[in-house]
Amino acid sequence: MVPTPHAALVPLLARHAGHAHELLPLLHALQDRDGYVDPAHVPAIADALNLSRAEVHGVITFYHHFRSAPPPRTVVQICRAEACRSRGGEALVAHAEACTGARIDGEPCHGIGVESVYCLGQCALSPAVTINGDLHARVSPARFDALLALVPERKEGRHV
């Protein structure tokens, strides 16, 4: 017996129901809407798409993009691919950790999470970062500080 999904999940399940190939679009829709894919929804998703819970869980955990918990209020992603590394990306990581208190790919600190990402498509303008999904290129430590200062007052809730 699959538990009844939360009311907000029902329209998404109905839109994708019965088609296993709809798993990724459904997960992206949930991630876009809620900022994460609630593990409590896995049984209902599996049932709607005629998949096993293990298959759904496997996809969620395989792709780095999907979160299983709400994101921090401010998400900083720093490119760590070769071009950005060669232009000061690792020094930027160290600076971001020092000024936010958050460790890269670790637990958020004071509502700020710092994450690795590999290629933001700005190789010629590296190093590149995103802050709450907004892309910035040629980011120096000083520019990072200025960009972080522009983040709207951090209130409870999602700012992705």
Image: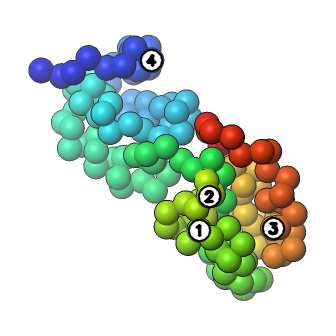
Residue 106 location (% of width, % of height): 49, 67
Height in image: 121 above or below 86?
Answer: above
Q: Is residue 156 left or right of residue 92?
A: left
| Residue wearing tag 2 | 110
Drawn side of residue 153 relative to residue 73, left or right: right
Q: Which is more foreground, mark 2 or mark 4?
A: 2
Q: Quadrant of residue 94?
A: bottom right
Q: Dot 4: what SS?
A: helix
Return the disc, 2 or 1, that comes first in the chain's sequence.
1
Q: Are marks 2 and 4 in contact (CB under 8 Å)?
A: no
Mark nearest the camera among 1 and 4 is 1
Question: Which residue, given by chain and number where applicable, does mark 1 sit on?
Answer: 102
* Upstream in sequence: badge 1 or badge 4: 4
Could you say where residue 21 lies in the image, as x and y percent from the top left?
35, 33
For disc 4, the marked residue is 8
Q: Residue at x 77, y 55 (%)?
A: 135
Q: CA distance from mark 2 to mark 1?
A: 8 Å
Residue 130's mark? none
Q: Are marks 1 and 4 in contact (CB under 8 Å)?
A: no
| Residue 22, placed above or below residue 1 | below
Label 1 Cα crowd, 10 Å radius (few <14 / some 14-19 / many 20+) = some
CA separation in Å, label 2 and label 4: 29 Å
Give the residue pinned by disc 3: 144
Q: Is residue 149 left or right of residue 16?
A: right
Q: Report, in whole angstroms, how far the alpha carbon at label 3 lies from the one at label 1.
A: 15 Å
